[in-house]
Amino acid sequence: MVSFLRLYLRVLGYLGSQKRVAALLVAANLALAVAAFAEPVLFGRIIDRLATAQGQGRPPSWEELAPLLGAWAGFGLFTIGASVLVALHADRLAHRRRLAVMSEYFEHVLHLPLGFHIGTHSGRLLKVMLDGTNAMWGLWLSFFREHCASFVALFVLLPFSLVLNWRLGLLLMALVVVFGVVTAYVLKKTERLQGAVEKYHTDLAERASDALGNVPVIQSFTRIEAESQGLRDIIDRLLGAQIPVLSWWALTAVATRASATLTVLAIFVVGVWLYMQGLATIGEIVTFMSFATMLITRLEQVVSFVNYIFMQAPKLDEFFGVIDTAPTVRDRPGAVDPGRLSGAVEFQNVTFSYDPRRPAVADVCFVAKPGETVALVGATGSGKSTTLGLLHRVFDPEHGRVLIDGHDIRDIPLIALRRNIGVVFQEPMLFARSIEENLLVGKPDATEEEIAIALERAQAQEFVTRQPDGVKTIIGERGRSLSGGERQRVSIARALLKNPPIMILDEATSALDATTERLLQAALDSAMKGRTTFVIAHRLATVRNADRILVFDQGRIVESGSFDELVALNGRFAQLARAQFMTGATPAAAAAAAG
Ligand code: ADP
Ligand code: MG
């Protein structure tokens, strides 16, 4: 119950810039709730006048009824006006805030570190965004349209009815207690189950979006039936958890309805009895009957509202869970933008681990002078990507420091740091937009000429002109309409447009045909030219041309030096080179061939 209230208050607190409209709506609701009392009271008074007149054996006069009728009409008009105002502004407010919160969430999620995104499926994040904001929208809408007035009505109506006639008032109190106890009991019974339901909903979204992202695999491996069955299994489990919850709430509806009918009946019977004792007037009976129906409507609204929040609570919890995830990589207060860096990089005893039992990168030290090319080699999982991730602050080191031009990179604003570092990812990571839009990601204000030069240098001009709409061609989700080698060259062109002093290249491991390989190598060469470059190398030519080679093994640098030095050393690198770069050939022969 307490956690509910907290959730509810938090959602209401999310009104941001609309707080003043919200306050206005609350005030209007208050006025409406008060006006709603007037009606049954006036009605009771009119009945009493009529009854008195009848008792005196004379027709009632208009003079004694007119003020009451006039007041009634006045309240009626006021209620209509205020309701229209509330309905109109409540809807606008809810829609505005829903979209505003959605964009806040989106921006927040984009700020979250890659470490978070690696562990969280994009389908889940999308589902949480849509469901969470929808739940908030519903909450705001129903609060400002109905529930605010309902709560006020309950708190004002009950004491007021006690003043009018305490015996009948107590009956209404009993009704409220019954509603409250039943609702609280059902909430307690079903809370855990509803949490499970939401978990299955999220699984469903994740599974569906995962499958939709891999349609080619599903079709070619004839997995359609299996994937559909997988989804149906989740649906079965979801329904298995949802149905009991629904049964409990149906039971609540029956229980509250029954107690409502009993209460109306009891008010009538007790009222008549009190009238016969001379303890109540006919008008009071009429007033209380109206009170009872009004109260029942309000109570039913409140219960259905509690039910609604209850059903949405896990969605909101998930939503706030993401919102409350703080970016671990953040700007330090007082971080100063150093402008364009020259690209001198130094790692000082850098250690980082994903898993506390075993560091992914341990005690890494090296220096790269501006303009140098450093190749990182080593078996998969030896820590090469992690090391370069530390350079552009995907993570921060646990121990040690990373310096660029003598600045600890944590003292440079994140945006400034990343402006200085270009990354060509192993997977090209393209947007489902036009080639041009993908390139403009590198430099939003690039001219057509600059784009053409970048494409030329990335060896991409030729295939781009072959596309049906040239640079305006839309390339499908993740660039699916291009071949692997073409995607890589577009992503290199994108990094070239950015023209940063430091470049990180994660060479694609996929084997390419000789022509593409040669084109790609030329593209990479131009990406390296004139800047400090770190390349995770899978090709002999890259390693051969590097100024320095860092050999990684289990997160540590075990050897470093130039190609010739390392070959002469005949240690780990020579062994690796024989296995990885030049199967069958001796390093010396390969060196001769490559040189
Ligand atoms: P490389 O690039 O040399 O193949 P990585 O730097 O990717 O190696 O990985 C180093 C180690 O860290 C590996 O053991 C890998 O399993 C682990 N690792 C990499 N990324 C993650 C991650 N996001 N979460 C947990 N462990 C990871
Ligand atoms: Mg890697």
Image (cartoon, rainbow, N blue to C red):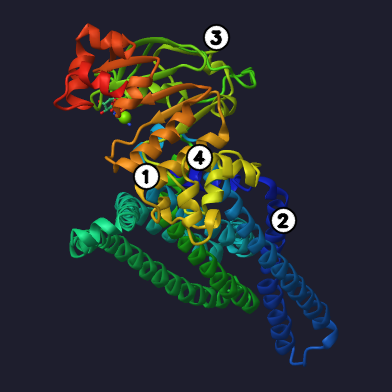
Q: Which mark is residue 485?
A: 1
Q: Earlier in the sequence, mark 3 or mark 4?
A: 3
Q: Residues within 10 Å of mark 2 (few under 14, many from 20)?
A: some
Distance from disc 3 to disc 1, alpha carbons, whole Å, reads: 37 Å
Distance from disc 2 to disc 4, alpha carbons, whole Å, reads: 59 Å
**Mark 3 belongs to which amino acid?**
Gly
Distance from disc 3 to disc 4, alpha carbons, whole Å, reads: 29 Å
- SS under mark 2: helix
- SS under mark 4: helix
Q: Nearer the viewer, mark 3 or mark 4?
A: 4
Q: Which residue is mark 3?
A: 406
Residue 523, x across and y down, in percent: 44, 35
Q: Is mark 4 within 8 Å of ligand 2?
A: no
Q: Earlier in the sequence, mark 3 or mark 1?
A: 3
Q: Which residue is mark 4?
A: 493
Q: Is residue 139 left or right of residue 391?
A: right
Q: Residues within 10 Å of mark 3 (few under 14, many from 20)?
A: few
Residue 351, x across and y down, in percent: 35, 14
Q: Nearer the viewer, mark 3 or mark 1?
A: 1
Give above or below for 321 relative to 334.
below
Distance from disc 1 to disc 2, alpha carbons, whole Å, reads: 64 Å
Q: Earlier in the sequence, mark 2 or mark 3?
A: 2
Viewer-nearest residue: 459 or 268: 459
Q: Nearer the viewer, mark 2 or mark 3?
A: 3
Q: Which mark is residue 27?
A: 2
**Mark 2 belongs to which amino acid?**
Ala
